[in-house]
Amino acid sequence: MKITRVEAIPLAVPYRRPFAFASGRVTAADHVLVRITTDDGLVGHGEAPPRPYTYGETASSIVAAVRDLFAPVLVGADPFARERIRADLGRTVANNAVKGAVDVALWDLVGQACGQPVHVLLGHAADDVAAAHMIGLGTPAEMVADAVEFRDTYGVEAFKVKVGRDLAHDMAAVRELRRELGDAVELYADANRGWDADTAIIAARRLAEHHVTMLEEPNPADDVLGRRRIVAASPIPVVGDESTITLGGVARSLLDGDAQAISVKVARTGFTDSAKIVGLCEGLGVTTMVGNQIDGMLGTVASTALACGQRALARHPVEVTNFLLMADDVLAEPPVIADGRAAARQAPGLGVTIDPDKLAHYRTDT
Protein backbone atom coordinates (compact mmCIF):
# COMPACT_ATOMS: atom_id res chain seq x y z
CA MET A 1 0.00 0.00 0.00
CA LYS A 2 1.41 3.37 -1.04
CA ILE A 3 0.21 6.93 -0.63
CA THR A 4 -0.86 8.44 -3.94
CA ARG A 5 -2.39 11.78 -2.93
CA VAL A 6 -2.26 14.26 -0.05
CA GLU A 7 -4.74 17.14 0.21
CA ALA A 8 -5.21 20.06 2.58
CA ILE A 9 -8.72 21.49 2.38
CA PRO A 10 -9.42 24.73 4.29
CA LEU A 11 -12.83 24.99 5.96
CA ALA A 12 -14.82 27.71 7.68
CA VAL A 13 -17.61 26.44 9.95
CA PRO A 14 -19.48 29.04 12.07
CA TYR A 15 -19.84 28.78 15.83
CA ARG A 16 -23.18 29.00 17.59
CA ARG A 17 -21.51 31.50 19.89
CA PRO A 18 -17.95 32.82 20.18
CA PHE A 19 -15.44 31.06 22.40
CA ALA A 20 -13.02 33.30 24.30
CA PHE A 21 -9.88 32.62 26.32
CA ALA A 22 -6.96 34.66 27.62
CA SER A 23 -4.85 34.33 24.46
CA GLY A 24 -7.56 34.57 21.80
CA ARG A 25 -11.17 34.39 20.65
CA VAL A 26 -12.78 32.30 17.91
CA THR A 27 -16.05 32.86 16.07
CA ALA A 28 -15.61 30.20 13.39
CA ALA A 29 -13.69 26.96 12.97
CA ASP A 30 -11.19 27.92 10.27
CA HIS A 31 -9.73 24.44 10.25
CA VAL A 32 -7.96 22.40 7.58
CA LEU A 33 -9.01 18.89 6.61
CA VAL A 34 -6.00 16.75 5.71
CA ARG A 35 -6.94 13.88 3.38
CA ILE A 36 -4.51 11.11 2.41
CA THR A 37 -5.40 8.57 -0.31
CA THR A 38 -3.64 5.28 -1.09
CA ASP A 39 -3.34 3.12 -4.18
CA ASP A 40 -5.71 0.64 -2.48
CA GLY A 41 -8.44 3.28 -2.51
CA LEU A 42 -8.34 3.87 1.25
CA VAL A 43 -8.73 7.45 2.50
CA GLY A 44 -7.45 8.69 5.86
CA HIS A 45 -8.43 11.97 7.49
CA GLY A 46 -6.97 14.35 10.05
CA GLU A 47 -8.02 17.79 11.31
CA ALA A 48 -5.57 20.69 11.68
CA PRO A 49 -6.93 23.60 13.76
CA PRO A 50 -4.67 26.64 13.23
CA ARG A 51 -3.85 28.63 16.34
CA PRO A 52 -1.62 31.55 15.25
CA TYR A 53 -1.54 33.01 18.77
CA THR A 54 -0.16 29.74 20.14
CA TYR A 55 1.79 27.93 17.42
CA GLY A 56 2.04 30.55 14.67
CA GLU A 57 0.11 28.49 12.12
CA THR A 58 -2.75 29.79 9.99
CA ALA A 59 -5.05 27.94 7.63
CA SER A 60 -3.07 29.33 4.70
CA SER A 61 0.26 28.28 6.15
CA ILE A 62 -1.06 24.77 6.85
CA VAL A 63 -2.29 24.38 3.28
CA ALA A 64 1.05 25.64 1.96
CA ALA A 65 3.05 23.35 4.24
CA VAL A 66 1.09 20.30 3.11
CA ARG A 67 1.31 21.25 -0.56
CA ASP A 68 4.92 22.39 -0.72
CA LEU A 69 6.71 20.52 2.07
CA PHE A 70 4.91 17.40 3.21
CA ALA A 71 3.00 16.02 0.21
CA PRO A 72 6.25 15.51 -1.77
CA VAL A 73 7.59 13.46 1.16
CA LEU A 74 4.38 11.48 1.70
CA VAL A 75 3.45 10.52 -1.85
CA GLY A 76 4.90 7.08 -2.54
CA ALA A 77 5.42 6.29 1.16
CA ASP A 78 3.98 3.31 3.04
CA PRO A 79 1.43 4.53 5.64
CA PHE A 80 2.67 1.83 8.02
CA ALA A 81 6.15 3.39 8.03
CA ARG A 82 5.08 6.05 10.49
CA GLU A 83 8.47 6.37 12.19
CA ARG A 84 10.23 6.94 8.87
CA ILE A 85 7.58 9.48 7.89
CA ARG A 86 7.87 11.13 11.30
CA ALA A 87 11.62 11.53 10.80
CA ASP A 88 11.14 12.95 7.30
CA LEU A 89 8.52 15.46 8.43
CA GLY A 90 10.70 16.35 11.41
CA ARG A 91 13.27 17.90 9.08
CA THR A 92 10.83 20.83 8.87
CA VAL A 93 10.65 22.66 12.19
CA ALA A 94 7.40 23.58 13.97
CA ASN A 95 4.18 23.15 11.91
CA ASN A 96 2.75 21.20 14.83
CA ALA A 97 -0.88 21.16 13.70
CA VAL A 98 0.07 19.94 10.20
CA LYS A 99 2.20 17.12 11.54
CA GLY A 100 -0.50 16.13 14.02
CA ALA A 101 -3.18 15.97 11.33
CA VAL A 102 -0.95 13.94 8.99
CA ASP A 103 -0.19 11.46 11.77
CA VAL A 104 -3.89 11.07 12.59
CA ALA A 105 -4.68 10.46 8.92
CA LEU A 106 -1.93 7.80 8.73
CA TRP A 107 -3.33 5.96 11.75
CA ASP A 108 -6.78 6.18 10.17
CA LEU A 109 -5.37 4.47 7.07
CA VAL A 110 -3.54 1.81 9.08
CA GLY A 111 -6.67 1.02 11.09
CA GLN A 112 -8.72 0.65 7.94
CA ALA A 113 -6.08 -1.59 6.35
CA CYS A 114 -5.95 -3.79 9.47
CA GLY A 115 -9.71 -3.79 10.00
CA GLN A 116 -9.27 -2.40 13.52
CA PRO A 117 -10.35 0.84 15.25
CA VAL A 118 -7.53 3.22 16.11
CA HIS A 119 -8.21 3.01 19.84
CA VAL A 120 -7.70 -0.75 19.68
CA LEU A 121 -4.38 -0.34 17.87
CA LEU A 122 -3.32 2.20 20.51
CA GLY A 123 -3.88 -0.25 23.34
CA HIS A 124 -7.66 -0.59 23.90
CA ALA A 125 -7.66 0.61 27.49
CA ALA A 126 -11.37 1.47 27.36
CA ASP A 127 -14.33 1.76 25.02
CA ASP A 128 -15.59 5.02 26.47
CA VAL A 129 -14.33 7.80 28.73
CA ALA A 130 -15.75 10.52 30.94
CA ALA A 131 -16.16 13.84 29.13
CA ALA A 132 -14.97 17.24 30.31
CA HIS A 133 -16.21 20.57 28.96
CA MET A 134 -14.16 23.77 28.50
CA ILE A 135 -15.98 26.90 29.69
CA GLY A 136 -14.93 29.98 27.73
CA LEU A 137 -14.42 33.43 29.18
CA GLY A 138 -17.55 35.49 29.80
CA THR A 139 -19.47 37.03 32.63
CA PRO A 140 -19.88 34.77 35.66
CA ALA A 141 -23.55 34.31 34.73
CA GLU A 142 -22.66 33.31 31.16
CA MET A 143 -20.03 30.85 32.33
CA VAL A 144 -22.42 29.29 34.83
CA ALA A 145 -25.12 29.00 32.16
CA ASP A 146 -22.66 27.22 29.85
CA ALA A 147 -21.72 24.72 32.56
CA VAL A 148 -25.33 24.08 33.56
CA GLU A 149 -26.29 23.45 29.93
CA PHE A 150 -23.61 20.80 29.51
CA ARG A 151 -24.30 19.24 32.90
CA ASP A 152 -28.05 19.01 32.39
CA THR A 153 -28.06 18.16 28.67
CA TYR A 154 -25.03 15.89 28.37
CA GLY A 155 -24.37 14.73 31.93
CA VAL A 156 -20.90 16.32 32.08
CA GLU A 157 -19.41 16.49 35.58
CA ALA A 158 -15.92 17.87 34.88
CA PHE A 159 -15.19 21.40 33.64
CA LYS A 160 -12.08 23.26 32.60
CA VAL A 161 -12.66 26.92 33.46
CA LYS A 162 -10.93 29.54 31.33
CA VAL A 163 -9.27 32.23 33.46
CA GLY A 164 -6.22 34.46 32.99
CA ARG A 165 -7.72 37.97 32.80
CA ASP A 166 -8.68 40.27 35.70
CA LEU A 167 -8.16 38.20 38.84
CA ALA A 168 -11.25 39.47 40.66
CA HIS A 169 -13.44 38.65 37.66
CA ASP A 170 -11.90 35.19 37.34
CA MET A 171 -12.42 34.38 41.00
CA ALA A 172 -16.01 35.60 40.84
CA ALA A 173 -16.69 33.20 37.97
CA VAL A 174 -15.05 30.28 39.78
CA ARG A 175 -16.94 31.07 42.96
CA GLU A 176 -20.29 31.13 41.14
CA LEU A 177 -19.51 27.93 39.26
CA ARG A 178 -18.66 26.08 42.46
CA ARG A 179 -21.76 27.39 44.20
CA GLU A 180 -24.04 26.38 41.32
CA LEU A 181 -22.46 23.02 40.48
CA GLY A 182 -21.66 21.80 43.98
CA ASP A 183 -18.62 20.04 45.36
CA ALA A 184 -19.14 16.76 43.47
CA VAL A 185 -18.27 18.34 40.11
CA GLU A 186 -14.60 18.66 39.17
CA LEU A 187 -13.36 22.14 38.28
CA TYR A 188 -9.88 22.82 36.95
CA ALA A 189 -8.57 26.08 35.54
CA ASP A 190 -6.68 27.20 32.43
CA ALA A 191 -5.14 30.68 32.25
CA ASN A 192 -3.73 30.30 28.71
CA ARG A 193 -0.57 32.15 29.81
CA GLY A 194 -2.63 35.21 30.78
CA TRP A 195 -1.19 36.13 34.21
CA ASP A 196 2.25 37.18 35.36
CA ALA A 197 3.93 34.88 37.86
CA ASP A 198 3.05 36.88 40.99
CA THR A 199 -0.63 37.07 40.03
CA ALA A 200 -0.65 33.37 39.21
CA ILE A 201 0.67 32.47 42.66
CA ILE A 202 -2.12 34.46 44.31
CA ALA A 203 -4.63 32.92 41.91
CA ALA A 204 -3.49 29.36 42.62
CA ARG A 205 -4.03 29.84 46.35
CA ARG A 206 -7.50 31.31 45.81
CA LEU A 207 -8.45 28.59 43.31
CA ALA A 208 -7.53 25.95 45.89
CA GLU A 209 -10.03 27.50 48.30
CA HIS A 210 -12.76 26.67 45.75
CA HIS A 211 -11.50 23.09 45.39
CA VAL A 212 -10.14 23.67 41.89
CA THR A 213 -7.97 20.62 41.19
CA MET A 214 -5.35 21.96 38.70
CA LEU A 215 -4.06 25.14 37.08
CA GLU A 216 -2.96 25.01 33.45
CA GLU A 217 -0.51 27.41 31.78
CA PRO A 218 -0.72 30.17 34.42
CA ASN A 219 1.89 32.55 32.91
CA PRO A 220 3.78 33.10 29.63
CA ALA A 221 5.54 29.94 28.47
CA ASP A 222 8.89 31.70 28.00
CA ASP A 223 8.89 32.96 31.61
CA VAL A 224 10.46 29.72 32.83
CA LEU A 225 11.80 31.12 36.09
CA GLY A 226 8.40 32.59 36.91
CA ARG A 227 6.80 29.24 36.10
CA ARG A 228 9.09 27.45 38.52
CA ARG A 229 8.20 29.94 41.25
CA ILE A 230 4.52 29.22 40.59
CA VAL A 231 5.06 25.46 40.75
CA ALA A 232 6.94 25.81 44.04
CA ALA A 233 4.27 28.03 45.61
CA SER A 234 1.05 26.55 44.20
CA PRO A 235 -1.08 24.32 46.44
CA ILE A 236 -2.55 22.67 43.32
CA PRO A 237 -0.70 20.97 40.43
CA VAL A 238 0.45 23.17 37.55
CA VAL A 239 -0.29 21.68 34.13
CA GLY A 240 1.87 22.18 31.05
CA ASP A 241 0.06 22.69 27.75
CA GLU A 242 1.23 25.33 25.25
CA SER A 243 4.65 25.26 26.93
CA THR A 244 5.02 21.51 26.35
CA ILE A 245 4.23 20.95 22.68
CA THR A 246 6.93 18.41 21.82
CA LEU A 247 8.28 15.24 23.39
CA GLY A 248 11.57 16.94 24.22
CA GLY A 249 9.74 19.98 25.56
CA VAL A 250 7.71 17.80 27.91
CA ALA A 251 10.86 16.08 29.19
CA ARG A 252 12.64 19.38 29.85
CA SER A 253 9.61 20.94 31.50
CA LEU A 254 9.09 18.05 33.89
CA LEU A 255 12.75 17.58 34.77
CA ASP A 256 13.30 21.32 35.24
CA GLY A 257 10.28 21.70 37.52
CA ASP A 258 8.15 23.77 35.15
CA ALA A 259 5.08 21.50 35.30
CA GLN A 260 3.58 18.72 37.40
CA ALA A 261 1.07 17.34 34.88
CA ILE A 262 0.76 17.43 31.08
CA SER A 263 -2.13 18.15 28.73
CA VAL A 264 -1.81 16.01 25.58
CA LYS A 265 -3.47 17.19 22.36
CA VAL A 266 -3.90 15.06 19.27
CA ALA A 267 -4.15 18.24 17.19
CA ARG A 268 -0.46 19.04 17.77
CA THR A 269 1.21 15.67 18.48
CA GLY A 270 -1.01 13.23 16.60
CA PHE A 271 -1.31 9.71 17.95
CA THR A 272 2.35 8.74 17.64
CA ASP A 273 3.98 11.51 19.64
CA SER A 274 1.05 11.72 22.04
CA ALA A 275 1.60 8.07 22.97
CA LYS A 276 5.32 8.75 23.42
CA ILE A 277 4.53 11.67 25.74
CA VAL A 278 2.12 9.54 27.75
CA GLY A 279 4.73 6.80 28.13
CA LEU A 280 7.36 9.30 29.26
CA CYS A 281 4.98 10.76 31.83
CA GLU A 282 3.95 7.32 33.09
CA GLY A 283 7.59 6.50 33.71
CA LEU A 284 8.01 9.71 35.69
CA GLY A 285 4.76 9.22 37.63
CA VAL A 286 3.20 12.32 36.06
CA THR A 287 -0.51 12.73 35.30
CA THR A 288 -1.56 13.19 31.68
CA MET A 289 -4.93 14.20 30.27
CA VAL A 290 -6.41 14.83 26.82
CA GLY A 291 -6.87 18.53 26.13
CA ASN A 292 -9.00 20.28 23.52
CA GLN A 293 -7.68 22.50 20.73
CA ILE A 294 -11.26 23.74 20.20
CA ASP A 295 -11.48 20.70 17.95
CA GLY A 296 -14.16 20.04 15.39
CA MET A 297 -15.94 16.70 15.11
CA LEU A 298 -13.03 14.91 13.48
CA GLY A 299 -10.59 16.11 16.11
CA THR A 300 -13.05 15.07 18.80
CA VAL A 301 -13.26 11.53 17.40
CA ALA A 302 -9.46 11.39 17.33
CA SER A 303 -9.13 12.66 20.92
CA THR A 304 -11.63 10.09 22.14
CA ALA A 305 -9.72 7.33 20.34
CA LEU A 306 -6.45 8.38 21.97
CA ALA A 307 -7.98 8.49 25.44
CA CYS A 308 -9.63 5.08 25.00
CA GLY A 309 -6.36 3.64 23.73
CA GLN A 310 -4.14 4.71 26.62
CA ARG A 311 -4.82 3.62 30.20
CA ALA A 312 -3.19 6.68 31.72
CA LEU A 313 -5.41 9.01 29.69
CA ALA A 314 -8.65 7.08 30.23
CA ARG A 315 -8.43 7.80 33.97
CA HIS A 316 -9.15 11.52 33.64
CA PRO A 317 -12.14 13.23 31.98
CA VAL A 318 -11.36 14.05 28.36
CA GLU A 319 -12.04 17.48 26.84
CA VAL A 320 -14.28 16.44 23.95
CA THR A 321 -17.42 18.58 24.05
CA ASN A 322 -16.50 21.86 22.39
CA PHE A 323 -17.49 20.73 18.90
CA LEU A 324 -21.02 21.21 20.23
CA LEU A 325 -20.40 24.97 20.15
CA MET A 326 -20.08 24.77 16.37
CA ALA A 327 -23.16 25.26 14.21
CA ASP A 328 -22.27 22.33 11.95
CA ASP A 329 -19.33 20.31 10.63
CA VAL A 330 -18.35 18.01 7.76
CA LEU A 331 -18.73 14.59 9.39
CA ALA A 332 -21.68 12.49 8.29
CA GLU A 333 -22.11 11.07 11.82
CA PRO A 334 -21.36 13.56 14.64
CA PRO A 335 -19.79 12.37 17.90
CA VAL A 336 -22.20 11.61 20.72
CA ILE A 337 -21.84 12.77 24.32
CA ALA A 338 -24.34 10.95 26.56
CA ASP A 339 -24.51 10.47 30.33
CA GLY A 340 -21.28 12.40 30.64
CA ARG A 341 -19.28 9.99 28.47
CA ALA A 342 -17.83 9.77 24.97
CA ALA A 343 -17.45 6.41 23.22
CA ALA A 344 -14.72 5.36 20.81
CA ARG A 345 -15.94 4.37 17.36
CA GLN A 346 -15.80 0.66 16.68
CA ALA A 347 -15.39 0.81 12.90
CA PRO A 348 -11.90 0.38 11.39
CA GLY A 349 -9.60 3.40 11.57
CA LEU A 350 -11.31 6.47 12.96
CA GLY A 351 -14.66 5.25 11.69
CA VAL A 352 -15.54 8.58 10.09
CA THR A 353 -17.23 9.51 6.84
CA ILE A 354 -17.00 12.99 5.35
CA ASP A 355 -20.29 14.38 4.09
CA PRO A 356 -19.48 15.52 0.52
CA ASP A 357 -22.22 18.15 0.45
CA LYS A 358 -21.09 19.72 3.71
CA LEU A 359 -17.49 19.60 2.60
CA ALA A 360 -18.39 21.42 -0.60
CA HIS A 361 -20.41 23.97 1.38
CA TYR A 362 -17.78 24.81 4.01
CA ARG A 363 -14.55 24.58 2.08
CA THR A 364 -13.02 27.95 1.28
CA ASP A 365 -10.67 27.08 -1.59
CA THR A 366 -13.29 26.86 -4.33
Image: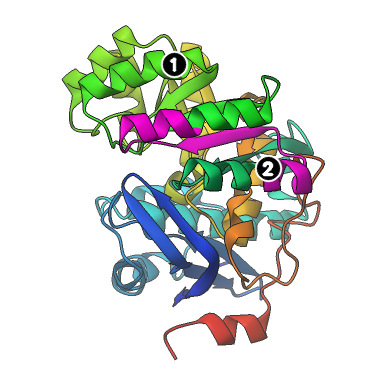
- Sequence order check: which comes first, mark 1 or mark 2? 2
Q: Residue furthest bottom?
A: 366
- Crowd rating for badge 1 (residues with CA inside 10 Å; few <14, some 14–19, many 20+): many
Q: State how far apart marks 1 and 2 are (Cα).
A: 26 Å
**Position in image of residue 244 (x %, y %):** 34, 33
Q: Is residue 334 above or below residue 88?
A: below
What is the magenta range?
A: 149-173
| Foreground pick, 288 / 137 | 137
Quadrant into which the C terminus falls: bottom left
Total marks shown come to: 2
Quadrant into which the N terminus falls: bottom right
Q: Do labels 1 and 2 touch, CB within 8 Å?
A: no
**Position in image of residue 273 (x %, y %):** 46, 39
Give the residue at mark 2: 148
Q: Is residue 360 magenta?
A: no
Give the residue at mark 1: 237
Three-letter residue code for mark 1: Pro
Q: Is residue 155 magenta?
A: yes
